[in-house]
Amino acid sequence: MSDLFLKNVCKSYEKKQDKAQYAVKDFTLKIEDGEFVIFVGPSGCGKSTTLRMIAGLEDITGGELWIDGKLCNYVEPGERDLSMVFQNYALYPNMNVYDNMAFSLSVRKVPKKEIDKKVHETAEILGLESLLKRRPGELSGGQKQRVAIGSAIMRSPKAFLMDEPLSNLDAKLRSQMRVELAKLHESLGTTMIYVTHDQTEAMTLGTKIVVMKDGIIQQADSPKEVYDNPANMFVAGFIGSPSMNFFNGRIRTYAGMPVFETVTGERLEIPGSRGKVLEEKYRNKWVILGIRPEHFLTKTDGSGSCLTGEITAREMLGAESIVYLKTAAEEAAARVPVETPGKPGDKLTLSADMERAHFFDGHTNENIFYQGGRQ
Ligand SMILES: Nc1ncnc2c1ncn2[C@@H]1O[C@H](COP(=O)(O)OP(=O)(O)OP(=O)(O)O)[C@@H](O)[C@H]1O
Ligand SMILES: [Mg+2]
């Protein structure tokens, strides 16, 4: 078990540093012992590069990597005591499951009895006992991935590094393995650093989510904080599905109340102290209003924060529906109860829960009411 500290870590794949484009830039993050840290972000934002630098598979261009209080920039991968699990299993095809799992300890000349005990213990945790004699070619994708994770556990690493380990699995296996991974983390208590594209994996597994864009950390915080208190518009739009709805507009005073006025003139009242702050600091200035799909209410009591639009599409999710609405200003998605009437082509009026709305500076795209962060 261990803690990690990355300080201003940078990576450039180019030789000439003066013209360097950075794949990862000024990456500073503290990972406490036992944390489950998730790296998320769009393709090419530097997630794998960061993980590979931690593993020692990629040189660090600048900055410092500390593992357990030891500077590790130049420590060989094999000496870092970390186990990496890849997207494509990396098993030895000619060895059976038992030998695949035993391999790392056999080469270290650990006594056979000890290896045998550990293989069986690990196989039991992962439900692999009945498969120990099979070769990788005789296993399903999910079983192969469990063997790969088993091999990683066998090394008793200081931390697990996983790069999209479930992305080759179908939806059902993915969700099963997700639960397995959560249990595994719970029982081993080992630090995990995990790269994914998958929102659900990020939100359910992580104790800390690191949202990246263009090689730069946008926010690193608990799943709840990242969702409820996004640092900027990028994080707000990236986390959550369907995405947060954004409306361009200005802060005005109307009938003595602070309002957000869309470019097409719809007015939404801003209650409470946030309304006062916006009126003071942003009157007549450009602001972007963000409303999550679940923060539209179908009850419209004429409270002055309604939006009307035409339904363009409707998705049934079982317990609820997603309604896509073309309002005068923007397209919007709303999560509504299934019994809400309306089919494509119909008009629908929704009221926005303005207490839970987000406001972003029209120029910097920063969240105007962002409250600090844990690190
Ligand atoms: N070996 C390499 N040589 C040159 N550039 C590279 C190399 N590996 C990655 N890059 C570049 O570095 C940037 C970050 O790549 P990285 O693989 O870390 O992204 P990622 O976030 O893991 O993306 P994905 O979600 O697609 O896996 C990208 O712009 C990529 O093109
Ligand atoms: Mg990657």
Image (cartoon, rainbow, N blue to C red):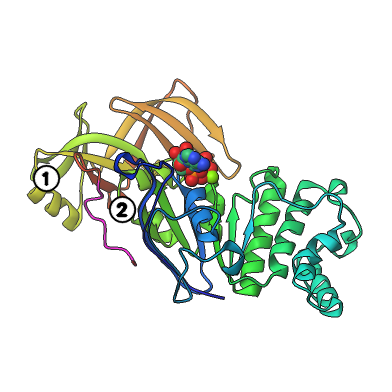
Q: Residue farthest to the top? A: 345
Which circle marks residue 282 in the picture? 1
Q: Quadrant of residue 95?
A: bottom right
Left or right of residue 301, residue 53 in this image: right
Residue farthest toward the right in the current orientation of the protein:
133
- 234 or 336, which lies in front? 234
Dot 1: within a 10 Å radius of its alpha carbon, few (fewer than 14), some, or many (20 or more) residues? some
Q: Is residue 177 visible?
A: yes
In the image, what residue type sits under mark 2?
Ala
Q: For mark 2, what is the residue?
A: 231
Q: CA distance from mark 2 to mark 1?
A: 18 Å
What residue is shown at x 43% (from left), y 26% (from top)?
Answer: 311
Q: The magenta stretch spans which residues? A: 366-374
Q: Quadrant of residue 352?
A: top left
The residue under the point 49% across, 56% down is: 53
Q: Is residue 231 left or right of residue 368?
A: right
